[in-house]
Image (cartoon, grey):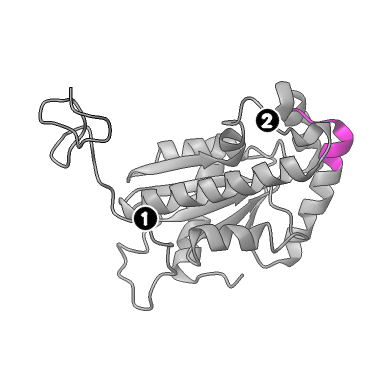
């Protein structure tokens, strides 16, 4: 047996540069705004490598729409859910529903950075991504601004904002720590209304099924690629 700290020996089972179990990924870089004069193929929303941030209150259908959109694109696309990444923490999970504090805030920040790193890594390997998060318009630095820092200036933010009655109905169907009280849902929905004066594209999916909402999202992404929104 080689001494502790010795380099791996041939046949030891340790991964090497030529091993099929060890793949060196290229470094991720922030997604950039489309360059002027980009080709139609680069601006085709169904085929372009893009990073989309789907914003909305709890119960808006963000995760369902994001997953469906990623499933049905013509190019490889990943869905990255902030809540899923937050819940990677098991022991010591800081649930903001039990009281917002420095621990829950720290875990949100860590989850956002982790999602941003994942998005850049996917894009560096030719895979588009869609992220979802309940970003508030009155928290620009740690919300939308934070996502822009994590992913890059080419990130396409889209707001999914159905009516309050729809959001309350969908929230009532949830379970576990993702189900909020009606009062919390109404408060969050009211804050989200601030996006109407932001200039960001907004999709009201109150009367749309998932497939038609995904089609509307494709249309919004196409417009954003052709004429990037300033935010």
| Residue sitting farthest toward the left | 10
Quadrant position of residue 40: bottom left
Which mark, residue 59? none
At which x and y percent is residue 36?
38, 78
Relative to 197, does residue 160 appear above or below in the rendering? above
Identify the residue under disc 1: 49
- Work out how far the residue at label 1 is from the one at label 2, CA to CA, in angstroms: 34 Å
At which x and y percent is residue 91?
64, 25
In front here: 112 or 206?
112
At which x and y percent is residue 95?
74, 32
Quadrant position of residue 30: bottom left
Q: Is the magenta stretch mostly helix, strand or loop?
A: helix
Identify the residue under disc 2: 93
Q: Is mark 2 on a helix, strand or loop?
A: loop
Relative to 125, does residue 173 appear above or below in the rendering? above
- In reply to whether residue 184 is colored magenta, the answer given is yes
- In reply to whether residue 138 is colored magenta, the answer given is no
- Please name the residue shown 51% across and 52% down the image: 116
The image quadrant where one finds the N terminus is top left
| Residue sitting farthest toward the front | 3
The image quadrant where one finds the C terminus is bottom right
């Amino acid at each position: 047996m080689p001494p502790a700290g010795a380099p791996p020996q041939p046949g030891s089972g340790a991964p090497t540069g030529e091993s099929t179990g060890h793949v060196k990924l290229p470094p991720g870089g922030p997604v950039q705004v489309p360059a002027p004069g980009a080709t139609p193929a680069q601006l085709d929303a169904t085929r372009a490598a893009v990073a989309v941030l789907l914003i909305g209150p709890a119960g808006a259908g963000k995760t369902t729409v994001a997953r469906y959109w990623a499933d049905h694109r013509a190019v490889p696309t990943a869905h990255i859910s902030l809540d899923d990444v937050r819940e990677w923490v098991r022991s010591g999970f800081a649930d903001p529903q039990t009281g917002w504090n420095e621990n829950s805030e720290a875990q949100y920040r860590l989850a956002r950075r982790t999602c941003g790193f994942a998005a850049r890594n996917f894009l560096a390997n030719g895979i588009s991504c869609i992220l979802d998060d309940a970003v508030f318009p009155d928290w620009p630095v740690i919300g939308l601004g934070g996502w822009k820092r994590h992913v890059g200036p080419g990130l396409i933010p889209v707001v999914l904002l159905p009516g309050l009655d729809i959001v309350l109905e969908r929230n009532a169907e949830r379970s576990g720590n993702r189900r909020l009280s009606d009062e919390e849902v109404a408060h969050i929905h009211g804050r989200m209304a601030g996006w109407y004066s932001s200039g960001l594209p907004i999709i009201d999916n109150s009367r749309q099924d998932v497939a038609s909402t995904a089609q509307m999202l494709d249309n919004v992404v196409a417009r954003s690629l052709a004429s990037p929104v300033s935010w």
